Image (spheres, rainbow, N blue to C red):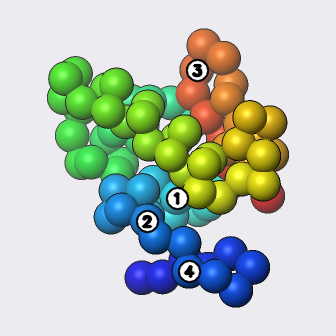
Amino acid sequence: MELRREGNVVPLAPQEFKILKFMVQNAQRVISRDERLNEVWGCQRYDLRRSVDSHIPRLRQKLEVDPASPVHFRTVHGFGYKFVT
């Protein structure tokens, strides 16, 4: 699996790629932390919940033009994130 942005390969960790794939497949829909944990990690372990959150900022850093003002990885306060095309 390889991701390219403007012709350049963007290195993604396996979990980052899985999260990106899941979010793209569910574009425009708000996805909760618990849903991401269940769908991407295949479990609902409480101790992994914060780890799940740490992947979104890394994806923003790698894929957004301006990570401080994300266009694609949007936060929906109090619920989760959504991917906007």
List x then y, in percent, for residue 8: 63, 82
Query: Which residue is denoted by mark 4 in the rendering?
Result: 9
Residue at disc 3, secondary structure: loop
In the foreground, 21 or 53: 53
For residue 20, the mark is 1
Q: Nearer the viewer, residue 48 or 8?
A: 8
- Residue 3 is at least partly visible in this image: yes
Badge 1 vs badge 2, beta-carbon distance below 8 Å: yes
In 3D space, how far apart are the residues under numbered discs 2 and 4 (Cα atoms)? 9 Å
The image's mark for residue 78 is none
Quick check: 4 above or below 29?
Answer: below
Q: Amino acid at mark 3?
A: Phe
User: Which of the two labelled residues, at mark 1 and mark 4, occupies the earlier sequence position?
Assistant: 4
Q: Which residue is mark 2?
A: 12
Kindly report the distance in space between the C-alpha atoms of the residues bearing marks 1 and 2: 10 Å
Residue visible at 36% across and 62% down? 13
What type is the residue that disc 2 sits on?
Answer: Leu
Q: Residue 73 lies in what quarter of the image?
A: top right
Determine whether 23 is above or below 50 in the image.
below
Q: Is residue 84 visible?
A: no
